Structure formats: C-alpha cells, structure tokens
Image: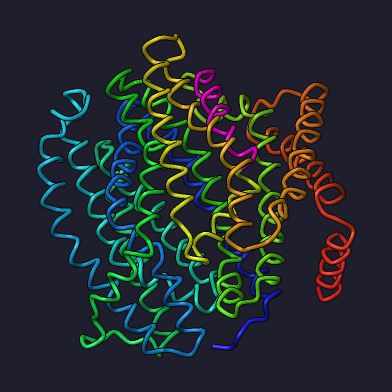
Amino acid sequence: MKELGKSKALLINTIASFVTFAVGLGITFFFTPFITDAVGEEAYGFVGLGNNIINYVTIVTIALNSVAGRFITIEYHRGKKQEASEYFTSVLVANLSIIPIILVVAIPAILNVESLLNVPAELVPSVKCLFFFILLNFIITLVSTVYNVATFITNRLYLSSIANIITSLLRVFLMCLLFGFLPANVAYVGISTCICTFVGLVLNMWYTKLLVPDIKLKKEYIHWTKVKELISAGAWNSVTKLSQVLSDGLDLLITNIWISASLMGSLSIAQQLPTYISTLLNTLINLFNPNLTMYYAKNDIDAVVKEMKISMKFSSFFTNIIFCGIVVFGRYFVGLWVPNQDVELIYRLLCVIMMSVVVSGVTTSLNNIFTITNKLKVNSIFWLIVSFTNVLLVFILLNTTPFGIYAVAGVSKATGILGNLFFIPIYACYCLKIKWNTFYPIILRYMGVTLAMMAVFYGIRTIAFVPSNWETFALLCGAAGIVGGIMNFFILLNGAERKILSNKILSRVKKA
C-alpha cells in the first residue's frame, strides 16, 4: 500500500478515531438506559464488574503484551524483518500457552460466583452466563493482541478505527436482535461483545497480511528467549497494571461486597462516560506513538520532545472542553440519559470520577516515554505505592466517615491528580535526559485555560435555557463547545501553532 505523509496520516487517523469514539459513545448512550430499564440497575452493574475482574487477569498477561508492539516496531524499522517476525511469533504462541492456565482458575470461579460475590438469587444464572462470555471475549482478545501491531508499524491506525466501527455497528445489530426477540438477559451484552471481538480479530489478521507481509508466522521463529526478554522488559507494566487495579479496578468490587449491589449499579453507570473519554484520550495519544517510537529508534531525542509536546496539546485541546462540559452541564445530561435512575447520585459520582481528567488530559501522553525508553521500573513502583495508599484510605473512610460510595469513587482520583502533576512530568524528563521542567509550561497553560473555560461555561449555563430534550441539550453543548474551542485556539496554542493550524484549515477549504 502507498505510504502516507506524516500530516496526512495524523489527519486521517484523527478523523477515524473520532468517528470510532462517536459510534461507541452513541451505542453506550442508547443501550445503557435501554439495558438498565430492561434488566435492572443491579444486573447492569455486573457488566462493569465482570470487565473489571478481567482487568485483574491482565496483570498476568500485560508484562508480555504491553511491550511487544515496541520491540516488533523497532526491529521492523531497523530493517530486521526476521527479528520482528521472531518477536511476533513468540508472543502469539506465549499467549496461546497462557489460556489453559486462565481457564483452570476462571471456570470454577464463575460456576461458584454466588459464593464469591453479592449476587441476587434471581440473577445468578444470567450473571454466570455473562461472566463466561466476558472470559471468552478476553481469550479472543489475548489471541488478537499481536495482530494489532500491523497498523501501528505502518502508522495506519485509521484502519484499526474502521475495524472498530464495523464491530461497533455489528454490536448494535446483535444487541437489537437479542433484546428485541428474546427475554431480557444481561448475558446478551457479553455474547454480543464476544462475537464482535472475534470479527475484529479476523479483520486485524487480514491487516497484518496486507500491511506487513514480510512479518512471517513460522514454527522455527518460536524463541522462548524472546518471550523472556519481553516479560523482563514489561514486568514493570504488570506492576503498573496492578496499581491501576488497586486504584480504580476495585471500585465496583468494593461497592458490591461492602456497600450494596444497587449502589454498584449506580457507580457502574457513572463510570460509562469517563471510560469512553479515557478511551478517546488514549486513542488520540496513540496516534503519535508510531512517530515517537520511530524517532527514539533513530535516537532523535529533539524530535521525540517536539512530537510529545504536540501530543500533549492535541489531547488537551479536546479533553478540557469535554471535562468542563460534563461538570457544568452533566446534570442535564444524566437526567435525559437515565431518567428512571437516581439522577442526582449518578451526576455527583460522575463529577467525582471526572476529577482526574483535570491533569491527566495533558499528562497522559508522557506515560508513553516510559515505554519507548524501556524505563518502567520507577514509574511502576511509584504508582504501586500510591495504589496501596488508596486502598488503605478507602477502607479507613468507609469505616470512619459517612462518605460511603463517594470515598470509593474519589480517593484514587485525588491521588491521581497529585501523581500526574508532580511525578509524571519530572520523571519523563529524567528518562529523556532533558531539563526537568520541559513540559510544565504546557501543563500550566492547560490548567489556566481549563479554569477560565469552566468559569465561562458556568456563565453560559446561568444565562441559557434549561434543556428539556436531546435537541436543546445538543444545541447548548454545541454553543459551549464552540466557545471552548475558540478559547483553546487563542490561549492554549501559541502563535506559531495557531498559524500552522489556520494554514492547514484554509488549505483544506480551498481544496474543497
């Protein structure tokens, strides 16, 4: 296939990412109230809980898979195609070898789920079925992980977005089919997701054959020394994943066991939108990863720093508009979205969960530096200490204060803000061997424009109408979004960046 220029690739990848995000978000908006009304808030909470439990399992597999793309990509760009093929083959075989171990542990746990979790008696059969298909979905994902690298190597991430759009639309069809013609059952969520993940695997296998035909899958390319090398390099990513699980992934489990299944359902609903925003943020950041990895492979640190600064501003340009919009207009949104649930509780939880975006919207890009430089140890240890502190604080607050579910949802967000503000930027500079405060001007500018935008959005809410339907809500948010975009353009971006962006927009308009 014909190579894309850097700017064109970024534009196409960005558009495809936003379309994917919009489709996924639309599905969530439509099906969350539909499913909660059909099967109940308690039952829906087990969808999020099941996915969180799968995240516990990925602690074991992430050491291998988190750095596989980096090693394969670097060897490929260095012209060592056989080396890249050996990593590719070895990772796939290693993942297949892990599956029997996972099944031995997971299947008995699913069969006895009512003894391990607080599951209402009438929901036990459907929850078991749901968890089984969530497990099967994870196994398919594990197999497909290495095939995702093809679009990364060739910087054609938009192809992955197209595959995601196809599977998302298929999920809509399957959910409508199952819920429309069969008795309501929360297990349909797992079944639909499982089928779509398999289709995604087939598409990514085709992309691999099309984009990187010189990466071969051969028996003689299986080298366990390669697997050991990858696990050694990615071991600290497992520690980081453990930290994430302790900080965020236990929220639903703690709520289920120590508070109630009903409140777990409310928390699960509140987590839906932040989860998609986090997905969008990571997708936008990942658009820059192929170039970052390539520049670092060529030892061009100046180019890495320049690309990282662009990535930070690019992600923050969209994140602060979304953050301010949710905090200011979120009550309207929740009231329209899930009117039959506890709107006030869900809105408050949504605001608490969104706190972490205040800083992570601009600093998340910096985490990629630890991967491309293969310096993961210190970052992993830092977040592990923070996560254990989070768990301790949550249990103290649950037993000594009336905060309840707000403590579960908010402690990790507060400590996350501090870590992202004071540790991540400084250690990223250390890994690149550059001045410690290199990235702080961007962070401080982002924080300033976000605070100003928040004030302006509150002003808009004060003088504007109260939206009574989705059309008027979209009109209100659209107006606020335009104002936020203008503020970012003139305050977040510097003069040179504004000129570059303006020229690119004008050139596109003239071509049209």
Q: Which range of residues does the magenta coloring cover?
A: 343-359
Quarter of the image with the N terminus in it: bottom right
Question: How was this image coloured?
Answer: rainbow
| Residue 200 horizontal side relative to residue 357, left or right | left
Quarter of the image with the C terminus in it: bottom right
In the image, residue 124 sits, relative to residue 228, either above or below, namely: above
Q: x%, y% of residue 288?
A: 61, 66
Please name the residue shown 43% across and 20% down the image.
405
Please name the residue shown 82% across and 63% down the image.
501
- In the picture, residue 185 is in which quadrant? top left
Please name the residue shown 43% across and 70% down the image.
69
- For the residue pair 68 and 432, the one nearer the viewer reads as 432
In the image, residue 152 sits, relative to residue 250, either above or below, namely: below
Q: x%, y% of residue 466?
A: 72, 23
Q: x%, y% of residue 277?
A: 56, 45
Q: x%, y% of residue 159?
A: 51, 72
| Residue 76 horizontal side relative to residue 365, left or right | left
